[in-house]
Amino acid sequence: MNYFFRKAGIKDIEFISKVIIEAEKSGSTMIGLANILETDESTLKEYLIKILEEKIDGCEFSLSSFVIAEYNDTPVAAFGGWIEGENEDGQPSSQLKSNLIGFLLPKEKLFALKNKSEAIKGIAIERELQTHQLEYAFVIKEQRGNHLTNLIIDELLKIAKKQNSSIKKSQVQVFENNTVAVRVYENSGYKITKRVESKNPETLKYFPFNVKLLMEKEL
Amino acid sequence: MEKVEILEKVRQILITVLKHEKFEMRDDLTASDVDGWDSLTHMEIITEIETEFNIKFRLKELNKLKNMATLIELIQSKL
Amino acid sequence: MVFNSLNFAVFLLLVFILYWFVFKKNAKTQNILLLVASIVFYCMADWKFIFLLAASGFINFYLAKFIAQKKEGKIRSLFFFSGIILNVGLLLYFKYFNFFIQSFVTLFNYSGAGISFTPFHILLPLGISFFTFQMIGYLIDVNNDEIEPTGDLLGFCTYLAYFPKILSGPIERVQKFLPQIQKKREFDYGMAVDGLREILWGLFKKMVIADNCAEIANTIFNSSAESTLYSGSTLVLGALFYTIQIYCDFSGYSDMACGISKLFNIRIVNNFAFPFFSTNIRDFWKKWHISLTSWMMDYIFTPLSFILRKYKKTGLIISILLTFLLVGLWHGANWTFIVFGLLNGFYFIPQILKGSMNKNKIVVKGRLTTLLKEFFGMFGLFILISLTAVFFRAENIGHATKYFHDMLSGLIYSWGYVQTFNLILSQIVLLGVIIIFFIIEWLGREQEYAIAQLGLKWKRPLRWAMYFAIIFAIIFAIVILGGKEQQFVYFQF
């Protein structure tokens, strides 16, 4: 299979917004982000496009985090990766993410988030500083089964090593019921190191599952 | 506005949002030092500050905030 | 050396044999041969500027490395912008120097001053528009961290000088080309045959259709500059024939370039994907001179429209107009090209206002018959493009405006200039050939080139008969034209 890998650029903003939404579904029909922001898919897409256009580096909403795989000159897959804490302002990605949401989205959305903070925190795993983070993998249906995600992970790790050779760990978070994804990460050498089950019954209202796994790989 | 006044207003906002007073308004205070001050409540605090002081922050400015000192500085620069 | 010459055929055969039989040891030896052959090829076309080409290669190669070594900052920007200015400056000097000065002088003279300007005698290095664009794209991609600069000087120079594309493109991207030549190429019989078929088809387009259309178009255009010999309808025909000429000429060249490259098991981008079967302007430009349009979209339109995104549709309109102004200007230092570009840009406005810039439409995929609506869409688009083609062909703005004026004022429907029966006959025959040609193109519109799949499933004798028919048509065309060989239109860029 002849894939071509490159970093995402501004012409890929729409594609990446689709990648994020599909990745959020995590094999279900629920879009976690849409639920907690109390919005529908198409509005969420608009929000994501606005967010990506800001070109803030260092979090899961960074255009520059994404590596795109092309087949026959068409983007067919993408995955995001960054080094936690290594960005222009040295901020953790959660802060950058929440600044983006708070700044760009209508004020009511902040309150929507606040009301669900317990449900969100129940499933949240903090990202370790100075580690590599993976987030938002997506492959179009026709290209699945070709280990494309693993190839992209290789590219992402190459980029990370180049950015900071002293990074020792790469982490990825995945819902426990997404067995397909878990297997993919295991194939790239990631092992489950933590399991977080939400005690909050509201979590299942918004997220595809209430148990999240943390998987790690030594670099 | 005097720095003292700004500090006091910010302190009140923090108490309102975080629903406790378990913190000191020192220069090197960061979110991680305070119970309940996470990235979500941070945005709430920022919104309240904008309303209270009638100012508007830019995204890049928000990303540069490191601690209480930088926050106060930023507010002062906008008044 | 033109692709459709005996010299080139001999050259190609020689390189082919050396490549697969003598220099076949590994990727490096293969590339060395290609590089040397390409240098020879370029020198035979224009030896004076081989040093310019070499310098361009070396400078950009090392500049890219310097850029990537430095983290974002002043030094990196310095290297980057120096590189861009160097490449653009080169192009501006060789191609546009006289044009800019002349335009200034003309502007100045409107205020009464009587300055005269004798244009400098600046020779145009062949292929300069193509290779400088490749270098600029490379530097931008490296600066944006989209690609790593290559450390393979031999590979890079081979890429730059590669003879199938050095003279008239396509504008190939480093990241698509380099990986192919860094591996040893094994002979692929299927690919080589495919290449030969593509070359054959390109030759057919160029020699049978383009050159014959050129005969007619030249007669009409050349005379219309000075006099008003022909009726309006003839002028319309002239524009239509010219449009077909330019399509068959350039797409024929592109087919040949692709096919030649396939003989060496290297894929390069095909510049055309049946543009005249599009029903809207955006589709058209996605399928016409693809490597140039995609270059312009990636490096000019996308960043520009991003910067202007606050202005929504207005921003898009400004971006597209500027982009196409550059597309026009790229073709040559003449106001006619600028008008050509701008007109095409204006054609986009309805689509932008409707908000359908990003919709992709496949032309009646799979079905052999087309709805009447689609057909009229294609026909309408063809007319629109032909209008801009008048500017493309005209010597200057005055010529173009006169052409339109004469076209609109002559309402007689006659074959105006045609004096003899033979000429009428040859025109009708040509029209017949063109119709058959477009039918073949239509049937093959989902392939890389029209006859890519044609005849592959037939019995061998029948397939060979098809080859002979095409070769015969080409030879027939050569005989008919009797040596009045037309230069490839895109050689002048």
Image (cartoon, grey):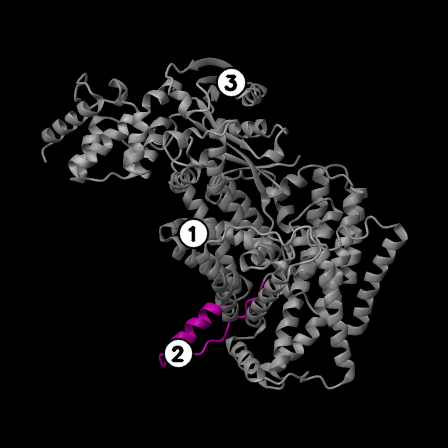
Horizontal side, residue C275 vs residue B25: left or right = right
The structure residue drawn at horizontal position 34% and vertical position 35%, both measured from the top left corner, is A100
Query: From what the image shows, is residue C426 above or below residue C286?
Result: below
Read off the magenta span.
C98-124
User: Are dots 1 and 3 on a single chain?
Assistant: no
Callout 2 environment at 10 Å: few (<14), some (14 to 19), or many (20+)? few
Image mark 1: chain: C
Query: Which residue is label 2 attached to?
Result: C109
For marks 2 and 3, give the one nearer the viewer. Answer: 3
Give how far across and how far down residue A167 sits, in percent.
45, 22
The quadrant in which the N terminus of chain A is found is top right
Query: Which residue is label 1 attached to?
Result: C305
Q: CA distance from mark 2 to mark 1?
A: 36 Å
| Label pair 1/3, CB-CB below 8 angstroms | no
Horizontal side, residue C323 vs residue A180: left or right = left
Q: Quadrant of residue A129?
A: top left
Kind of residue at badge 3: Lys
Residue A217 circle label: 3
The structure residue drawn at horizontal position 58% and vertical position 58%, both measured from the top left corner, is C284
Secondary structure, mark 2, is helix
Give how far across and how far down residue A125 sits, in percent.
40, 19
Secondary structure, mark 1, is helix
Give how far across and how far down residue B62 sits, in percent.
28, 34
Q: Quadrant of residue A187?
A: top right
User: Are dots 2 and 1 on a single chain?
Assistant: yes
